[in-house]
Amino acid sequence: MGFEALALQLLNGLSHATTLFLMASGLTLIFGVTRIVNFAHGSFFMLGALWAAHAVTHWWPEWAESAWTYALAMLLGAALAALLGALTELLLLRRMRHAPQLYQLVATFGLTLALHDAMRWYFGPEEVFAPRFPGLKGAIQLGESYFPTWQLFTLVLGPLVWLGLHLLLTRTLWGQRVKAATQDRDMLNALGVNPAPLMLGVVMLGCGLAGLAGALQLPREPAHLQMDVNVVVETFVVVVTGGLGSIGGAFAAALLIGLIHAFGLSFFPQATLVLVFLTMAVVLVWRPQGLAGSAVHAEQRESVPVFALWPVSGGGQGVFALAFVGLTLMAWGQGDYGRSLAEDVMVMMLFGLSLQWMMALGGLVSFGHAAFFALGAYGTALSHLHWGAGLFAALAAGMALALTVALAFGALVVRSSGVYLAMLSLALAQMIWAGATQWVGLTGGDNGLIGVRLIAPESRALADAVLCGFMLLAILAMARVVRSSRGAALQALRDAPWRAAASGLPVQALRYQVFVGSATLAGLAGGLWAAFKGAVFPSVASVAMSVDALLVILLGGVHQL
C-alpha cells in the first residue's frame, strides 16, 4: 500500500473517530453522573439520523438547498434526541439509579427494542438517502485518490467538541457541579444543590450528542433502522477502552478504534470487527479499568443474599416439581410442536443455569454468554457434518470447543469485574458472531449450517430423556456445590473479594474455575440446541440470545435456583 492510500485510510479513520467520540462522550457523561450504563444510546443516534433525513428529503426538501437550513435540520434532529433522552431519564433511568448494573443493561436493551419498533412505525422500514451537504459536496485530491470534503469537516469537528466539553466541565459552575455529582451526589445534595436537574441536563446533553452524531452521517451514508445496534456496540468498545467516566479517555480510545477500523478494512477486511474487539481486550489486560478510567468503577460490588436453592419449603418443592413434570408431559402430549416447545424450554433452562452458576456463585457479570452457547452449537454441528460424529461425540466436541476458548478467555476474566467484565464478554460474543458471519467456508455465513441429523425421528423420545437427564444433573451439581465449602468460598469472594483474599482464599483461581465450568455448561446447552434444531445460524451468538439467558435468571431471581 502506497503513501497516498495510507493517508486516505488515516483520514477515514480520523473521520470515523469523530462519530465514535460524539457517541462515546455522551455515553460516558451519562455513566459518570448517573452510574447507569445505557445500552439504548444507539437509539438516539438513529433518531437524529432518521429525523434529519426525512426533514431534508420528504418533509421540507427545499431545506437541502441551503447549508443553513440543512444544518438546522441536523440540529433539530439532535434536539429531538435530547428531548427523548429527557423522557427516558424521567421515566426509566431515574427509577433504576440504585438497581444493579446488569438490570440496567437489560432494561435499556429492552428500551432499544421498543424505540426500534416505534421508529419503524413512524418513519417506515425503508432506507433514506439524504442529499450532499451544500457547499461541502466536493473532495480534496490526494495523488490519484480523493477524500470527501464533508468527512474532512467532521474530522475537524471532533477535537472542537472535545474542547467544548472540556471547557464546559472545567470552566463553568454547571460543569463543576456535574463533576461534584459524579464524585459524591449525597454530599452535593447536603450542600443544598439538587442533583436531579444536573442528571437530567447531563442525560439530555449526552443523548443530544448521540443525535448529532447520527445526523452528521447523512451526507455519507443513508439513514436506516440497523444504525442503533451497529453503532452502540462499537461505542461501548470505545467507552470501556477509554475508561468509564473519562472524556479524555473516550477521545483517545475513539482515535485508536477509529484508526484500527479504517486500516483493518484495508488489510484484514474479513476480520475488522475481531480486530476492534481484540484491541479492547488487549487494553483491558494491560489496564483493567481502561486507558483513563478509575479503578473504583471497576471494583463496585453488589451486596447480595446467600444463594437459595429453592424459593419454597419442602412441601412447596414437591408441588413445584409435580407441576413442572405435569406441564412437561402435557407439552409432550400435544404433538411435535408441544414437544419442540418443551425441548426449547429445557435447553434454555440449562443455558440459564450455566449463567447463574457464574453470576450467583462467582459474582461474574456477563452480557455475552451466548459466545459459549454458540461455540457449543457450532462445535457440535461441525463435528457431525465434517467427521460424522454421533450425538454424544458431537456434544463432547462442542463442549471441548467452548472449554478451550474459556480456558484462554478466563485469563482476562479474573482481572476484570463489573461493567468491564460485562463488556469483555459482549466483545467475545461479537467476535464469535463476526467469525460465524464472515468465515463462510467453515460456518456457511448467514446461510448457517443445515442438515444436522443427530437425532432420528424414531429416537426422539430417548433424546428428550437425555436432555432431561442433563438438566437434572446440572441442577443437582449446582445444589451440591452451593452446600459445599467451595460454594461458601465462592459466595464469600463474590460479596467481599478483598476480605476473602485476606482470609487466604485463592480468589483468582476460584473465579477462573467457576467461569470455565459455566462456559462448558453453556457449550453443552448450545450443542443440544443444534442437535434438536438440526441447524445453526450466527444468531446463536447474538446479543438477543445473551439477553434471553439473562432474562431466565433475572425474572426468576439471580440468587434463587
Image (spheres, rainbow, N blue to C red):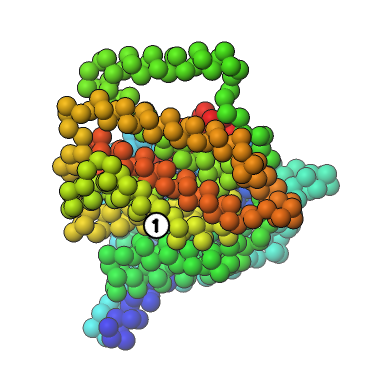
Q: Nearer the viewer, residue 233 or 15?
A: 233
Q: Is residue 383 visible?
A: yes
Q: Quadrant of residue 451?
A: top left
Q: Nearer the viewer, residue 404 or 283?
A: 404
Give the x, y percent position of residue 280: 48, 64
Look at the numbered disc 1 and give the secondary structure of its residue. Answer: helix
Q: Quadrant of the N terminus?
A: bottom left
Q: Residue at x 60, y 17 (%)?
A: 313
Q: Is residue 228 visible?
A: no
* Amino acid found under the numbered disc labelled 1: Thr
Give the x, y percent position of residue 295: 66, 60
Q: Nearer the viewer, residue 333 or 473?
A: 473
Q: Nearer the viewer, residue 530 or 490?
A: 490
Q: Is residue 278 left or right of residue 362?
A: left
Give the x, y percent position of residue 303: 69, 40
Mark 1 neighbour density, 10 Å: few (under 14) some (14–19) many (20 or more): some
552 versus 36 height, above or below: above
For label 1, the residue is 404
354 versus 10 height, above or below: above
Q: Residue at x 27, y 65 (%)?
A: 270
